[in-house]
Image (cartoon, rainbow, N blue to C red):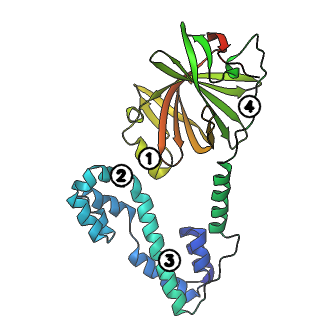
């Protein structure tokens, strides 16, 4: 096989980081790698087939102890079986990547090729630098979000903890104030308001020199899908389309930023938000992942700022 054909085959079938390591091998080494890799590779289709046959995917992967444990715990208490459905592509990909690295290491020794030291601008170094920057950003203070304030005509965007207002024929107290500073430079706020046993969130977002107001109520994420928590923790994103209360919702936005609880004046926390709209685009499902684990889900609808009246502060703000 010619050198050009070998290089094309390698770049077509392997990720850049792996193919760059393979290019250091002589042609004989490249051909030997392709033969050894094809003999040792694990097939995703076969992995799923073994998974559906008595849950033996671990056996196919060569993980005998894990397979025995999987059986003894009743397929991971049944939950593990479902989780593996979503994890399988990543597991097989990592397994094959590890096998490829071992073969390259063996061939490097055989052909006496010394691996180069990673430069400071390597992918791992860049990832560490970005992660450190994100961690530092999470300690920063919230951005200044100060819409024009007229004490004689207070608007929804001027709310603060301690204010009171009339909404939906009831009087509400503002008991919490939360701010989201997004990576794209935009900022929005949530105000938690309570009336008796009822609690809702009022979201305020700048929109073309005005403010878009959304009424949100918290819902249980299991009401959306039993697999939602698994999808977010293992795939770092929910599915694109789901059904809730007989209606289809479609993913519209994905936002990354920092979340602040202004009422408690705590430090910022990383947050990721996915917003879904129904076909008529008049109802919203919002999924938030705060920090490493906490997941919250809300259902909302856009409302007019004129639905609020008698907004008054119970404490005086300068």
Q: Position of residue 143 (x, y in %)?
A: 73, 38
CA neighbours of label 1 inside 10 A, class few (<14), some (14 to 19), many (20+): some
Lower sequence index among marks 1 and 2: 2
**Residue plotted at (76% across, 14% down):** 151
Asked if the residue at tag 1 contacts the one at tag 4, i.e. Cβ–Cβ closer than 8 Å, the answer is no
- Image: 277 above or below 37: above
CA neighbours of label 4 inside 10 A, class few (<14), some (14 to 19), many (20+): some
Q: Mark 4 or mark 2, which is nearer to you?
A: 4
Depth check: 19 or 86 in front?
86
Q: Position of residue 272 (x, y in %)?
A: 57, 43
Q: Position of residue 34 (x, y in %)?
A: 48, 79
Quickly name the residue at label 1.
Answer: 231
Quickly name the residue at label 2.
Answer: 83
Q: Which mark is residue 145?
A: 4
Lower sequence index among marks 3 and 1: 3
Lower sequence index among marks 4 and 1: 4
3D distance between C-alphas at marks 3 and 2: 27 Å
3D distance between C-alphas at marks 3 and 1: 29 Å
**Residue plotted at (46% across, 73% down):** 98
3D distance between C-alphas at marks 4 and 3: 50 Å
Q: In terms of secondary structure, where does tag 1 sit?
A: helix
Q: Which mark is residue 101?
A: 3
**Residue plotted at (57% across, 11% down):** 167
């Amino acid at each position: 096989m010619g050198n050009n054909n070998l290089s094309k085959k390698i770049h077509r079938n392997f990720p850049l980081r792996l193919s760059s390591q393979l290019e250091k091998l002589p042609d004989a080494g490249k051909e030997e790698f392709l033969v050894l890799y094809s003999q040792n590779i694990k097939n995703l289709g076969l992995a799923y087939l073994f998974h559906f046959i008595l849950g033996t995917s671990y056996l196919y992967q060569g993980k005998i102890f894990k397979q025995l444990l999987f059986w003894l715990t009743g397929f991971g208490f049944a939950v593990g079986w479902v989780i593996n459905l979503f994890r399988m592509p990543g597991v097989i990909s990592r397994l094959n990547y590890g096998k490829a690295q071992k073969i390259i290491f063996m061939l490097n020794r055989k052909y006496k090729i010394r691996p180069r030291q990673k430069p400071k601008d390597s992918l791992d170094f860049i990832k560490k630098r970005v992660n450190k920057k994100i961690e530092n950003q999470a300690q920063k203070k919230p951005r200044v979000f100060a819409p024009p304030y007229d004490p004689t005509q207070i608007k929804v965007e001027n709310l603060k903890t301690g204010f009171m207002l009339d909404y939906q024929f009831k009087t509400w107290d503002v008991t919490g104030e939360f701010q989201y500073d997004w990576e794209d430079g935009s900022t929005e706020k949530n105000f938690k308001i309570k009336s008796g046993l009822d609690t809702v969130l009022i979201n305020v977002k700048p929109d073309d020199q005005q403010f878009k107001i959304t009424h949100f109520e918290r819902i249980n994420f299991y009401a959306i899908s039993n697999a939602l928590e698994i999808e977010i923790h293992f795939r770092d994103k929910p599915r694109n389309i789901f059904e809730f209360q007989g209606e289809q919702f479609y993913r519209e936005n994905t936002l990354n930023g920092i979340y602040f609880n202004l009422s408690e004046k705590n430090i910022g926390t990383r947050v990721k938000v996915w917003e879904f709209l129904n076909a008529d685009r008049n109802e919203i499902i919002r999924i938030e992942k705060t920090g490493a684990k906490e997941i919250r889900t809300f259902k909302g609808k856009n409302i007019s700022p004129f639905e609020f009246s008698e907004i008054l502060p119970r404490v005086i703000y300068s």
